[in-house]
Amino acid sequence: MLSEPRSGRLAAWGNALLAGLVSPDDAVLAIVGSDAVHRVEGLPGESAPVGLTLALGRLRALGVSGLRVALPAPGHPLGLSGPAEFNARALEAEEAVVCHGAALGLVPEVYEAGPEGDVHVEVVWHCLPVREAPPADVPSLGEAERELAEALRDATAVLSRLDVAGSGPVAEAAIEAYRARAERGREMLAPGYPPRAVRVLELAQRVGLLVSLAYENGHGGAVSASEMGARVAALRPVERTGRRAQVAAYNAYVEERER
């Protein structure tokens, strides 16, 4: 959860395009980001993969009025509603986009080629049928904000007590550097999103960075099996809370329209 998920970019900027707040060129540029190209395969009415501009226009014609994000993990089908085939593909990719207004979903498949330092990335979004039902375990923005504050406080206290790398000044420096890069490189969300969604997404990504730093920097001072178990137990719920909050933030546009 260190970087912005591709499904988040597609949903956020796709929603802005559907609302008429950005041009197709600007939306596609933001969605593709640093990747080389994105295509959509399996779109109804198309026998071959098509570019994002055509795909987003076709989805609008099919009745799509909004896009939601799913960020599932093993045992946690966050944002999904079925069927099993779509859920399995989304779980393998660890992300997906679910259309609102048409029973379709999009799952990314990433292809990389080229030498280290000059990797060429192409993304194919597989368009598949989905079940029209409420998405699993997605909180409201208010719930997500409260959960994040509690999880961050509790996890920081436990990690600090166990002397785990990622809970002190090094982590704070990394978080600030990440935030500075994000502010220079992109908008947190696309036009049309409420300020609270931006705030929740920023905090969720901060939480995700804290968790990743703790995992990547070894066991710190947690040398016993019980202490290492306590560290994992502290990180697992905050990681889950961070993913739930990200989904709530990206899905806020559709939720606001439904209200």
Image (cartoon, grey):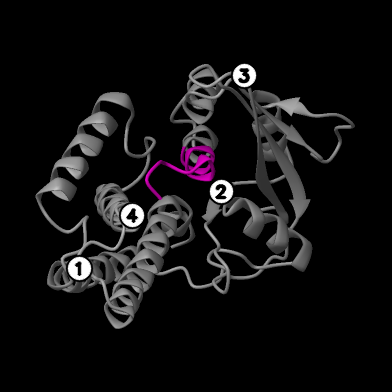
Q: CA distance from mark 3 to mark 2?
A: 32 Å
Q: Earlier in the sequence, mark 2 or mark 4?
A: 2
The residue indicated by pointer 2 is 67
The residue indicated by pointer 1 is 159
CB atoms of marks 1 and 4 within 8 Å: no
**Does the image show residue 100?**
no
**Does the image show residue 114?**
yes
Kindly identify the amino acid type of the residue bearing the numbered disc 3.
Gly
The residue closer to the viewer here, 161 or 112, is 161
SS for dot 2 = strand
Kindly identify the amino acid type of the residue bearing the numbered disc 4.
Gly
Q: CA distance from mark 2 to mark 4?
A: 23 Å
- Label ID, residue 208: 4
SS for dot 3 = loop
Highlighted magenta segment, given as a residue range: 1-12
Callout in the foreground (1, 2): 1
